[in-house]
Amino acid sequence: MIELTHISKVYDGPNKVTALKDISLSIKEGEIFGVIGQSGAGKSTLIRCINMLERPTSGSVLVDGVEMTKLDGNALREQRKNIGMIFQHFNLLSSRTVYENVAFPLELQGMSKDEIRQRILPILDIVKLSDRLDNYPSQLSGGQKQRVGIARALASNPKVLLCDEATSALDPQTTKSILELLKDINEKLKLTIVLITHEMQVIKEICDRVAVIEGGIIIEEGPVLDVFTAPKEKTTREFVGSIISHKLPEEAWRHLNVQKEWHDGLCPLIRLNFTGDVTDEPIVAGMIRRFGLDVSILFGGVDYIQDTSFGHLIIVLNGSRESAEQAVAYLEGLPIKSEVIGYVAANH
Ligand SMILES: Nc1ncnc2c1ncn2[C@@H]1O[C@H](COP(=O)(O)OP(=O)(O)OP(=O)(O)O)[C@@H](O)[C@H]1O
């Protein structure tokens, strides 16, 4: 649905800034695609290059088969009807009511009052603002204002919705309800959604795939579950770590005094990562029963990405070296990721 090919963007001026460097991304029809990055990474520039609010310095932007970089004037206005956009600070007209804000883009298109009414009343129903039609933005909460923004973006029946930090000005509870609404319209209206954010929670809640941008470059990209369970780059690990901790606290780590070699009297310290329901038998109980080991769990948790669970455990296999070696080999044969982190004194 959206193909960005070798996009670069240079802001000219006394301090020339290269905001995007040779970015290529392919966003499929009907998916929710997230771009995450720290402040100044180039997120806003990237999303604005999709609807030509910013023109890339070089590269190609195809939206629904149309080369956006070649359009201007009426042709660009026409194609932009396919691409709705919502903003962090909502960008509503304060002198217009909810209804009038949502009607505004259709008025500009010259649509009749009756047509506008028929078009937007169902949309105001979807965003649950039917009882607020005559309110002004100043009479609404942040979440309600963003619902108006969403309704206005949907008024032209777009195929794509661009969300520029759409929940960054909202509290966590309101963020959740707006994300639920976005997921709902993605499913009901088969809308392709591209969102930019600096919050990994937003990616975790609703995105199908994610790209991580740093210094104008996409440093990592993939399905959200893959990026969460096996982040490759340092920045990605930091983003994932901001909401999911796979690590032992520093203090516990020091206390363990982890050794690299398996000397006598030491036991393996193992990290396990698993996704979904991967085995028929409980892993820890299985090791205790099969190998007569005493398994200590030092750290662990289960998290959910949308409907899929993924868990992590850090364990020590206390027992004879022979049994522990057999258990390590057994773990390697299971459909989970296991890694011997090092060796520690028994009975932790
Ligand atoms: N109009 C502009 N003129 C010059 N430089 C700009 C302009 N807009 C953005 N930049 C620069 O381009 C780089 C990327 O900015 P951009 O706003 O795209 O990043 P961002 O990831 O969206 O950051 P934030 O989350 O803080 O908005 C930054 O160095 C920024 O200063």
Image (cartoon, rainbow, N blue to C red):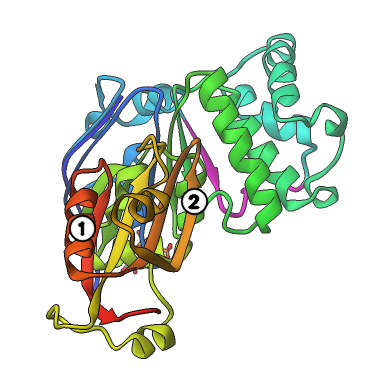
Location of ligand 1 given as a quarter of the image: bottom left
Q: Which residue is mark 1?
A: 328
At horizontal 67% and vertical 42% (from top left) the residue drawn is 177
Q: Is mark 1 within 8 Å of ligand 1?
A: no
Q: Position of residue 58 (x, y in %)?
A: 14, 46
Give the extent of the magenta segment.
84-94
Locate the N terminus and report the quarter of the image it occupies.
top left
Q: How many marks?
A: 2
**Residue at 75% across, 48% down:** 94
| Nearer the camera: disc 2 or disc 1 | 1
Q: Quadrant of residue 249?
A: bottom left
What secondary structure is marked by label 1?
Answer: helix
> For this view, does 26 lie left or right of residue 135?
left
| Mark 2, other Cα within 10 Å: few <14 / some 14–19 / many ≥20 | few
Specify the quadrant of the image occupied by residue 183. top right
Residue 87 lies, with reference to residue 267, above or below; the image says above
Return the x and y of residue 171 as percentages of the image width and height.
68, 58
